[in-house]
């Protein structure tokens, strides 16, 4: 969690919400926040190395007084060592223009020059994604601000056009290992509030602007892989196969027609991920065991030829229904994630199934004919399909999983969920996305589970009543047709 130090010295308390009424609650929910009302207190916190972000809300730090200069030098040096510092708030109203220009040059090695207070239309510039995300930022607005001149294009966040030149309402630049931001806003409006969060990298998916652009939506298809659906693994006809047919006939054609991104999200483990997998996750897929008298000399993770597969309860032969995920052909149990599945018969041919749910293996490949649809999708000239690996039941597990990285980079906000199993990998990803602020829709007959019927019913109920929305595949296709027409 970031640590935010707010410098408020002129009696306008940030915590009283005199600045940006909605900003403080958002900061408090996303970071640890401390407001320094004296220079001495601010120096204590900076010297301690506590803040990762510093917000300067007034011009006291710019005064040509010994203690102000000491704090300025300390903050400038601290910023260059990795902190993000943002000039905002009342600074623009009270600061000496020439003094702030000098500070930009001498303390931060920037050519920025403080200009005049102006009221102009401003437009969001094409900012580098690694600097800040644009998804929550207003494309354009009318601003009353203290503008900057001589800001390079790469450092301009919002630009306004004066009669003589392009000037910057907001600027953001790398300084040493850190970043320095400037927001000249004098109205303390929502646009500046959004920009402060973005500069601090504390914007979240729920902050993103909502629109009806289908490119901001994605169809997520989870785990429709051979291991879960292929008859070669003893998978009998079930809800997952019905879901596959509905995807083929209704959902995927409609999504592509509308320009909705199709994401194939699948188990795809590396050897390192297998070795680091928590036992609680591994247990769902069985594990290897040896008889007690054979235990001597067996190393960790390597039972060799003497080992055999057991299910999560230690049984050599799966005792439950015919289609649960740990069941193999003829009731066999595999030796866990990353274990050799052996050979299977596919279309009269013997095929090496590969290691269980590891990348680039036959068992982790898409179930036909969905595999053919994916290959077609990758060849689309516009909006091609994307394959995303996951290494847990939920594809949104972890600090920054591949799925979340992709959604953020594309500005995608609305997610349509399909795949198997509804109450496991589909459900885990669905609820995690809901908790992160995405709009989530379950396509009820576009997903299926091998659990009892009440598990499917329970998740459909919660998807519709609590977590988001629920509709059928035909409803989805009809909705697309209605929009297209």
Image (cartoon, rainbow, N blue to C red):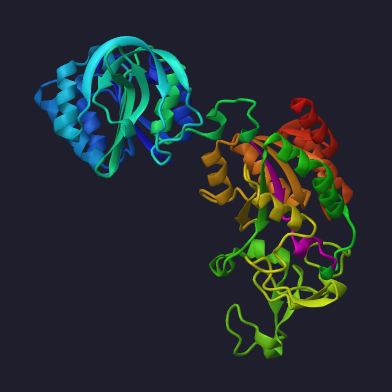
Could you say where residue 454 lies in the image, as x and y percent from the top left? 87, 46
The part of the image, by quadrant, that contains residue 217 is: top right
The part of the image, by quadrant, that contains residue 66 is: top left
The number of callouts visible is 0
Could you say where residue 451 lies in the image, as x and y percent from the top left? 84, 54
Observer-nearest of 271 and 58: 271
Outermost residue toward the top in this view: 119
Q: Give the range drawn in magenta.
A: 217-231
Q: Residue at x 69, y 55 (%)?
A: 375
Q: Can residue 27 be seen in this view?
A: yes
Q: Is residue 256 above or below residue 340?
A: above
Observer-nearest of 188 and 477: 477
The part of the image, by quadrant, that contains residue 191 is: top left
Q: Is residue 75 above or below residue 232?
A: above
Residue 283 relative to residue 13: left or right: right
Residue 225 painted magenta: yes
Q: Which residue is drawn at 79% across and 26% down?
A: 482
Could you say where residue 224 lies in the image, as x and y percent from the top left? 75, 56
């Amino acid at each position: 969690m970031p640590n935010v130090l707010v410098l408020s010295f002129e009696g306008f308390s940030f915590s009283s919400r005199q600045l940006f009424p909605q900003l403080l609650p958002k900061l408090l929910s996303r970071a640890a926040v401390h407001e320094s009302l004296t220079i001495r207190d601010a120096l204590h916190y900076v010297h301690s190395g506590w803040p990762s972000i510093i917000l300067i809300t007034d011009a006291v730090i710019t005064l040509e007084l010994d203690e102000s200069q000491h704090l300025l030098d300390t903050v400038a040096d601290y910023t260059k060592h990795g902190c993000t510092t943002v000039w905002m708030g009342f600074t623009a109203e009270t600061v000496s223009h020439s003094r702030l220009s000098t500070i930009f040059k001498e303390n931060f090695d920037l050519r920025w020059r403080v200009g005049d207070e102006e009221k102009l239309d401003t437009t969001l510039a094409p900012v580098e994604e690694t600097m800040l995300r644009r998804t929550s930022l207003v494309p354009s607005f009318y601003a009353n601000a203290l503008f900057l001149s001589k800001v390079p294009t790469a450092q301009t966040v919002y630009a306004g056009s004066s009669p003589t030149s392009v000037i910057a309402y907001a600027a953001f630049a790398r300084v040493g290992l850190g970043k320095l931001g400037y927001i000249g806003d004098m109205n303390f409006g929502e646009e500046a509030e959004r920009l402060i969060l973005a500069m601090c990298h504390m914007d979240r998916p729920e902050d993103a602007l909502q629109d009806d652009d289908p490119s901001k939506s994605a169809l997520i298809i989870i785990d429709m892989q051979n291991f879960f659906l292929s008859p070669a693994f003893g998978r009998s006809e079930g809800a997952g196969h019905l879901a596959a047919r509905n995807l083929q006939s209704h959902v995927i054609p409609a999504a592509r027609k509308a320009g909705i991104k199709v994401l194939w999200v699948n188990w795809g483990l590396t050897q390192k991920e297998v070795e680091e997998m928590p036992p609680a996750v591994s247990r769902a897929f069985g594990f290897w065991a040896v008889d007690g008298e054979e235990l001597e000399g067996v190393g960790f993770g390597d039972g060799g030829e003497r080992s055999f597969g057991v299910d999560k309860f230690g049984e050599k032969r799966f005792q439950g229904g015919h289609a649960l995920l740990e069941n193999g052909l003829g009731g066999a149990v595999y030796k866990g994630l990353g274990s050799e599945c052996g050979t299977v018969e596919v279309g009269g041919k013997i095929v090496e199934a590969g290691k269980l749910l590891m990348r680039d293996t036959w068992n982790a490949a898409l179930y036909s004919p969905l595999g053919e649809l994916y290959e077609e999708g990758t060849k689309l000239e516009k909006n091609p399909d994307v394959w995303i690996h996951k290494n847990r039941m939920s594809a949104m597990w972890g600090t920054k999983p591949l799925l979340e990285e992709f959604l953020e980079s594309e500005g995608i906000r609305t997610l349509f969920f399909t795949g198997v199993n509804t109450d496991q990998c589909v459900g885990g990803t669905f609820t995690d996305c809901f908790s992160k602020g995405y709009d989530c829709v379950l396509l009820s007959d576009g997903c299926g589970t091998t659990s009892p019927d009440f598990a499917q019913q329970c998740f459909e109920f919660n998807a519709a009543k609590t977590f988001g929305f629920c509709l059928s595949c035909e409803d989805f296709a009809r909705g697309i047709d209605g929009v297209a027409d």
